[in-house]
Amino acid sequence: MSPQFVDFDADGTLDMVAGIFDGSPHLARGTDKGHAPPEQILDRDGARIVMNAMWDFDSKPPKWVEQTRCDPEGGMLQRGHITSAWAFDWDADGDLDLLLGDHDHGQVMLRRNEGKAGAPAFATRNEYVRVGEQPLVVKGTVTTLRTIDWDGDGLLDLLVGSMGDAYGGGEGGGVYVCRNAGAKGAPRFQPPTVLIEPSARGHKDAVRPDAGLYMDAADLDGDSDLDLVVGGYSTWTPEPPALDDMQKARVAELQKQIAGLDEESQRYFEALREATKGLDDEAYTKAYAEFQKGEAGTARSARQKRQQTLREELEPLVPGMKRQSFTWYYENLAK
């Protein structure tokens, strides 16, 4: 998610660093034949770098687990889940440290590299990235991190995109910059300045990125300031058409049928929960598969097809919320 191309292992070839949804930063090493398969970036003891939530591939079956071994001194703000990572030399000691962005609550953490260029040895615990005395928390949770000299003072500032409400109608994501008021090797970030306001939603057309804002900065128009390129999901609900009486009656009938099928689906899931209640992982997996193959599972498949048919008929009469990804250009108009 939001990959970075950087010479992570100091061999003269660009590698790819990214956080992914399993809760760990990953590295795809560059080779003369392309990029190698991604590998988890590990700490100096050979353990996964995480916050306190991760997908455990070794569990049978694999599952989400929470642990506290990587919590910073003084404890964690809230449950943290890494989905973004950015490598840069935080302390100006010649090696790459890691900034880690949290998908769940917007925390930003530092994982310090105690090794050297080409031979990383990451600390076993995260550190808070702070604004003043307080840990930095990004409104709308973190989607991507970038370090760039936004204000031209020779220090790397922190650029952050946020997720917002990804699927619902709540407040969307934004883009922020935390200016660096410290010194080289000793960043000291100021509170976030809003570059792109969080979306208020309610659009009738695709007018802006609303959720999952991933940004990069560059002088795209050659006027010596930094513009933004932002990828993200736009959500909108088209203006409904005027309906005649026959269409209104059909809408009511379609909505009634869909509601009835939704109630059947709810009963299906209640029965599934009862059939798997109290089972361990192995027994749960077996019981779940058997339930899906049985009469209830067959009826569910037919019900889903019927629901889809009804919704496709209803959509042009009562348009629902649309969701599509776009790339947007924001010109910097500051003088």
Image (cartoon, rainbow, N blue to C red):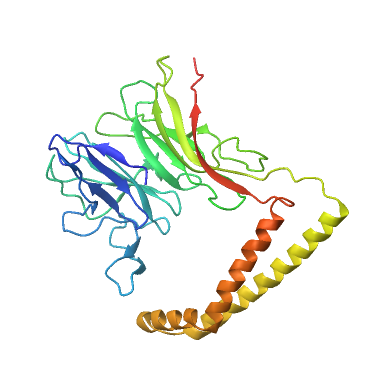
In percent of width and height, residue 296 lies at 55, 81
Q: Is residue 82 visible?
A: yes
In percent of width and height, residue 16 lies at 26, 42
Asked whether, in this view, residue 78 is left or right of residue 43, the answer is right
Query: 83 or 140: nearer the eye?
Result: 83
**Which corner quadrant of the image does residue 242 belong to?**
top right
Asked whether, in this view, residue 200 is left or right of residue 180, the answer is right
In percent of width and height, residue 217 lies at 40, 29
Query: Is the residue 266 above or below the residue 13 in the image?
Result: below
- Looking at the image, which residue is at 33% across and 74% down? 61
Q: How many marks?
A: 0
Query: 77 or 258: nearer the eye?
Result: 258
Question: Of all residues shown, which one is farthest toward the right?
Answer: 245
Query: 133 or 119: nearer the eye?
Result: 119
In percent of width and height, residue 288 lies at 45, 80
Q: Is residue 173 visible?
A: no
Query: Is the residue 242 above or below the residue 192 in the image?
Result: below
- Looking at the image, which residue is at 79% across and 62% down? 252
Asked whether, in this view, residue 123 is left or right of residue 242, the answer is left
- Looking at the image, which residue is at 65% across and 62% down? 309
